[in-house]
Image (spheres, rainbow, N blue to C red):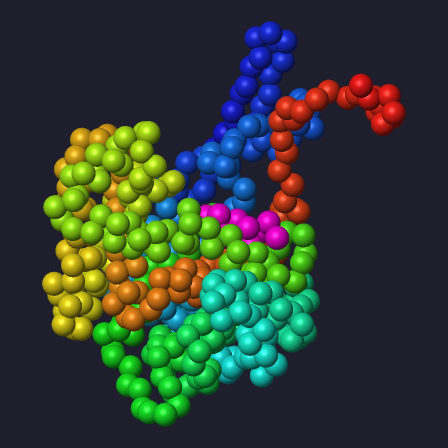
Amino acid sequence: MAEKKLILNDPDSGKSAELPVRTGTTGPDAADISSLYREHGLFTYDPGFVSTASCRSDITFIDGDQGLLMYRGYSIEELAQHSTFLEVAYLSLYGELPKKTQLEEFTDSIRYHTMIHEALKSFFRGFHYDAHPMAMMTGVVGSLSAFYHDSLDITDARAQEIFAHRMIAKMPTIAACAYKHSIGQPFIYPRNDLAYCENFLHMLFAVPCEEYEVDPVAAQALDMLFILHADHEQNASTSTVRLAGSSGTNPYAAMAAGIACLWGPAHGGANEAVLNMLEEVGDVSQIPKYIEKAKDKNDPFRLMGFGHRVYKNYDPRATVIRGMCHKLLKRMGKENDPLFELALELEQRALNDDYFKEKKLYPNVDFYSGIIYKALGLQTNMFTVMFAIARTVGWVAHWQEMTNDPEQRIGRPRQIYTGPAQRKYVPLNKRG
């Protein structure tokens, strides 16, 4: 079969360019423009990189029109229903679902790395009591290269693996320390006899003076949320990790860059914004008023949790989360939770409104996740931290893939310069 090519013709100059077309397993083809500037003196212009494939990747695929999300070829619905977060982590790192012995060895390795260096506790105490947990997480993760020198050789396969396991293991511990510091409680050591999410909930909510029993439904809900958030292709934070990592910086610095990017309200902070929006709407009777405000271009109010840069259909993760909301709230005796009822009604009103249907604004993953986090007893400033723990899996998988990609070069986007043309310097005493 002949290689596909895209032919570009310029009728003014009579010049043409032949661009190879790269084809993946599924999804749109991509025109390879790497020679366009070198051979024709042209850049492409794509604000936000919405039509640009920056790399080849085997990890995640999204079809926004069909509402499809797959990790290594497995649909997110199947994984959320049948798998566990650590199994999904193994799949993301190694490309295949693990056999029983492989999963046991992987789980043991993660447990081995759950503790953090004791000196890091002093680092936490250096933060002001009301510091945002994401600020603490960004700083602490960035500092890890000062403590763990055995995994800084990014060309060594074993060092890459140690780093990946270490990050997946330590992120819940770091997150729990940030939370405990923010509420003035002592840090709780990890318990390696507990499963991943059980251990995390124990570190969050246990105190030294009494026993704490983890609710299995709460642990199940958290595990499912972590699966749904584990990766999402070349999103802003993952692309940030790849861009930072492309310079050859140590992997902990690349992770810290990803966390900082995730903190933005347009990315990982969106679930916190959804909860704030629901509290602003306040009551089902106010929904028509706020839907009209959302449709008014001159009104600053935005209906958070609807629409997505990629999905032009119902976000498949939102359906799964909505079902878990019902299960968790019922377990906790909060099945008539007013925020959840408000969210359900708001979703139905929006889905039946022509404006939202025409613009394909469907609920996304953030619309219900904040309700689950709130039901678990977390403060809203911890919501993005939870996202970061889950997305660590995607970040380390993409960092490994990028580091081992022979086509990878340091990221260096170009620009269309719109400033002044070259001009002469005028001495200070001659400027009128």
The answer to whether residue 401 of the structure is visible from this angle is no
Asked which quadrant contains residue 329, the reply is bottom left
Q: Is residue 16 left or right of residue 53?
A: right
Image point (21%, 38%), residue name? 291
Image point (46%, 82%), residue name? 187
Q: Find the magenta span and give its range.
A: 235-244
The answer to whether residue 223 of the structure is visible from this angle is yes
Furthest residue toward top:
12
Q: Is residue 342 left or right of residue 394?
A: left
Report the label total: 0
Image point (21%, 34%), residue name? 292
The secondary structure that most of the magenta stretch takes on is: helix
Image vertical order of residue 407 relative to residue 13, above or below: below
Residue sitting nearer the eye, 8 or 261: 261
Image vertical order of residue 43 relative to residue 338, above or below: above
Image vertical order of residue 276 relative to residue 81, above or below: above
Q: Is residue 42 left or right of residue 125?
A: right
Q: Is residue 162 left or right of residue 227?
A: right
Q: Position of residue 332 (x, y in %)?
A: 18, 73
Q: Position of residue 62 (x, y in %)?
A: 37, 46
Residue 236 magenta-highlighted: yes
Residue sitting nearer the eye, 31 or 197: 197
Q: Position of residue 301 (x, y in %)?
A: 31, 39
Image point (51%, 52%), residue name? 261
Which part of the image, by quadrant, shows the C terminus? top right
Q: Position of residue 14 (x, y in %)?
A: 62, 9
